[in-house]
Amino acid sequence: MKPLLETIDTRFGTASKHAFSRGNTLPYTGVPFGMNYFVPQTSDQEGAWFFDPHLPIFQGIRLTHQPSPWIGDYSWLLLTPVTGQPRGNSLFHRQSSYDIDKACFQPHYLKLFSLRYQIETQLTPTCYGASIRLEQKQGKALSLYLHTADELTVEQVDKRTLALRQEGKTETNKNPLILFTALQMNTDILAITQEEGDWRIDLASSQAEIQLATSFISPSQALLNLPQKDFDSCKANAQADWENLLHRFDILETGEADRTFFDHCLYRLFLFPQTFYEVNESGQAIHMDLATGTIKPSVLFSNNGFWDTFRTTFPLFALVIPEHYRLFLEGFLNSYRDTGFLPKWLAPDERGMMPGTLLDGIIADSACKDMAPDLEKELLQAMLETAAKSDPLGINGRHGLAQYQELGYLSTDHHESVSHTLDYAYSDFCIANCAEKLGQNSIAETYKASSQNYKHLFDAETGYMRARDSQGNFRPDFSPYSWGRDYAECSAIQATLGVLHDIPGLCQLMGGKEAFSHYLLESCQDAPLFETTGYGYEIHEMSEMATAPFGQLAISNQPSFHIPYLFRYSDYPDYTALLIKSIRQKAFHPSWQAYPGDEDNGSLSAWYIWSALGFYPTCPGKPSYDLGIPLFDHLRVYLAKENKWLDIHAEQNYSHFNFVKECRLDQTSVSSIQHQDLLKAEQLTFTLSWLPNHS
């Protein structure tokens, strides 16, 4: 039986295009949360979609920092092994076919065979680089091309070592961004030549082992970051790093389920955020403050969009990798110390994308679960400052802050005003909870009151959250099926349910539990209609919803992640299990067309993992979970904070049993689960049934 790591195919979800996503993932080879990932490039003609699993073309190994095609890549470097002299200088002239079936795409190991050059390329990663093994099967001398979009210079340090420097700028802030790369060969370098901006390295042998390391700090730091072990030892270390995290979930009995996709989701879970700090000669963590171009102490992380990951990814981290979670919080706090704002979308510095300041949800969730008590005071200060300070550049913090403070909502003067308002109200709830825990009651009361601001946008006549102008008038040309303009990547149908922190209050607004239940039923039973009003064209999220048989439950995108669990608050609580199980079966596939939409930094993979566990953090910032339906007969989860295992059992787990008859935490029957009770428990047992409960 293969080790778990060798059964994971990193290509799942990569069969995606600009107009339609099946994950929009890349087949990253790297270590968990590494600074770089490595991907074979198949084309330079499709922008950020530079890997196609069906295209047997190999243009080289790309060192990449691309967290999403919608963000794009930065500080990337393409390494192409060749023999002889190609007739032209383009990537097209250098590329080779490769054998897809014999290629190996694993989290810790990449292997491809170039049919044109008869070169086998193997790569295994480290946190800051990789060990690369090249072998030309006919004994011909190897050459290596280096290609990047940045200005690239190459200097020879000694007869076997090169120092690379590539300089670009960050996308939004236009700060200087310099990547230093060290390449150390086990064979002599015969020549270095520049060919129209690219560089060619001629080696003395048909076999080479190349140690690669990068640094955003300095050339000397890149040399310090070089792997200190040979290829096989680096591979063993990378495998150990992955297994340490993957095996915090232990499937003992699969039952009728297949574990392949679950295992892939575990791999995706531990990719982001990425490391953006390094360790100097004294063993101290240091990072480059991109805003000032100075080196500062302590950790930093990048490549994360908190609008995506606060919902599912970080609550799962809190459960299984609390030691990493704390480091992440320190890194995000350092982002605040460097810039004066908590980050929203880092790649590598602030991109200013998506509504809200939803790192607040992660901070509140960490506070209610006691993840880092010693950081809570400064984290609260960071939340308060980010919530109350305007950025003159309009990149950081809350957009339209002055108007939100004056009116309690953003008006139609602002793009995606409804989504921003709902997210600000949720953030105010998060701030209130953190302040209350620290005994700052006056602040807590102020923000508790403003957490109710979502009510300003509810239109009782139509039953939806709607945009108002600054005079308080609802936008006249309203359709619940209209996407964009007032809503971020959804319509009023999904956005109206985006009150994570006050579901009882939303029920009351709608007219009570019966009306709330009717809204949920109608949303799922409705046709997947949409109007392109706000965008002027069909975005891929619309296409994915329209082609999936889930009504208006657009599970392909974050605003719908929690909707199946809202049935737990309705007259039809059993429907949550039915929806979760059917979505799990119909929307996710162990193939290159894996996901119902963008996987987004592990957030959709984390959603699937939660669905397989049988419970879900509907509102991060509240230490409780709503029940779903588990996937496997018997799964163990390692609760690292308690240094113990939780056993999750599913009794009568037949494929046609879609409901939960009873759930017991140890011997106590439960309808929801408190976080602290979960940590203390030994077993969580679900008894499934063919028909729903009617008692």
Image (tube, rainbow, N blue to C red):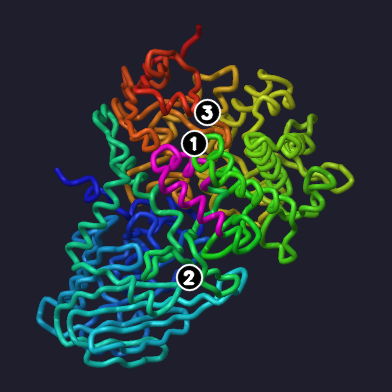
Proximity of marks 3 and 1: CB atoms separated by less than 8 Å: no
* Disc 1 + disc 2, Cβ < 8 Å: no
Q: At numbered mark 1, what does the secondary structure look like: helix, strand or loop?
A: loop
Numbered disc 3: secondary structure: strand
Question: In which quarter of the view is residue 648 placed?
Answer: top left
Q: Is disc 2 placed on a helix, strand or loop?
A: loop
Per the rendering, the mark at residue 285 is none
Q: Amino acid at mark 2?
A: Tyr
Residue in view at x 68 percent, y 53 percent: 386
Query: Front-most of 680 and 178?
Result: 680
The residue identified by callout 3 is 624
Upstream in the sequence, badge 1 or badge 2?
Answer: 2
Name the residue rendered at 56%, 54% in the picture: 333
Q: Would you name the residue on which mark 2 appears?
A: 74
Q: Tell which circle, 3 or 1, labels the residue nearer the N-terminal end.
A: 1
> Which corner quadrant of the image does residue 217 belong to?
bottom left
The residue under label 1 is 549
Q: Quadrant of the N terminus?
A: top left
Name above or below for residue 599 compared with residue 509: below
Q: Label 2 neighbourhood size at 10 Å, few (<14), some (14-19), many (20+)?
A: many
For the point 22% across and 60% down, which residue is it? 235
User: What span is colored magenta in the figure?
Assistant: 309-334
Query: Disc 1 residue type?
Result: Pro
- Nearer to us of marks 1 and 2 is 2
Residue closest to the far right: 471
* Residue 193 percent across, percent down from the top left: 32, 93
Considering depth in this image, is 611 or 427 the residue closer to the camera? 427
Mark found first going from the N terminus, 2 or 3 = 2
Q: CA distance from mark 1 to mark 2?
A: 37 Å
Say which residue appears at 33% left-offset and 60% top-offset: 30
